[in-house]
Image (cartoon, rainbow, N blue to C red):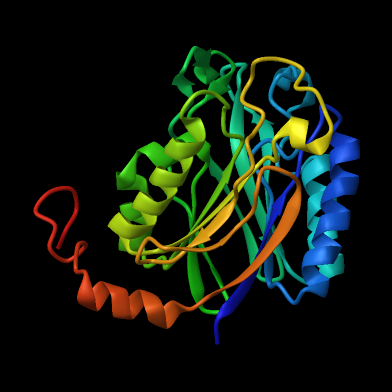
Amino acid sequence: MPLRIALSQITTGPDPASNLALLREETQRAAAAGARLVAFPEAAMACFGTRLGPIAEPLDGPWATEVRQIAKDAGLVVVAGMFTPAPDGRVTNTLLATGPGVETSYDKIHLYDAFGFAESKTVAPGSEVVTFDLDGVRIGLATCYDVRFPELFRAHADAGAVLSLLPASWGAGPGKREQWELLTRARALDATVWLAAVGQADPEASGLTAASSAPTGIGHSALIGPDGTVRERLDAGPGLLVGEVDTEEVTAVRRTVSVLANRKLGGGS
């Protein structure tokens, strides 16, 4: 059976408690739509432009504990971006994945030191590739700027994943939407995985004013098939995308386009 998932394209603010209320509401909407998983954007805990150190909490802290309760109450898996303390005084940009039978986290490996923004000043990088299983479907985790590095998505595939989740808070600017659309489709195609990319909604489309020049989202979340075609897409404003991931399609595409098996460099067997 296909795995039914939801992508919740929201605009979060600087207050973690207010954002939790939004996550609860959207999780209930996803459950009502029959989703087994709902993915929220990067920085779901608090938007970029917020001082991250004072709000960062460990994975057993109150914010993550409440996300676990939200997932439990709804009976589905929640994936949400948060910030956890790092040993060197910075924070880590963390995805929490929690729900029935699932409890894991991923720390963003590739930090956004580009386009005049220096995420590494306040954020420490992760180093581990993370996947988890839901209803027999293996899912890989990635975050925003990771999308520019195809080797991570191929590592998901090498670990048995057929779906990569990509929460993001994409920076706005000339050509940035086009890059987002190109990169997400390319990562699905060159790893032959489903790719579910969920971004922060454009603040202006949410009726808000961005507080700073930090990357606060452009929307355009999408569910992309393993052949690189867009199956579902949102516009710039808030919305809930619900779609189905057919694992058998991954098998068929990999049989036709054997880019993983044909690799000569970087981990092909």
- Residue 133, horizontal then vertical, whole percent: 53, 69
116 sits left or right of 198 in the view:
left
Where, by quadrant of the figure, is residue 269 drawn?
Answer: bottom left
238 sits left or right of 244 in the view:
right
Is residue 190 placed above or below 257 in the rendered structure? above
- Residue 7, horizontal then vertical, whole percent: 66, 57
Residue at the image point whose x is 37% and y is 67% from the top: 160
Is residue 12 placed above or below 228 in the rendered structure? above
237 sits left or right of 223 in the view:
right
Q: Quadrant of the N terminus?
A: bottom right
- Residue 218, horizontal then vertical, whole percent: 63, 36
Of residue 53 and residue 177, the one placed in the foreground of this image is: 177
Q: Decide if residue 7 is in sight here.
A: yes
Residue at the image point whose x is 52% and y is 41% from the top: 143
Q: Decide if residue 46 is in sight here.
A: no
- Residue 243, horizontal then vertical, whole percent: 61, 70
Q: Residue furthest bottom?
A: 1
Residue at the image point whose x is 64% and y is 65% from the top: 102
Is residue 106 placed above or below 156 in the rendered structure? above
63 sits left or right of 234 in the view:
right
Of residue 83 and residue 194, the one placed in the foreground of this image is: 194
How many numbered marks are there? Answer: 0
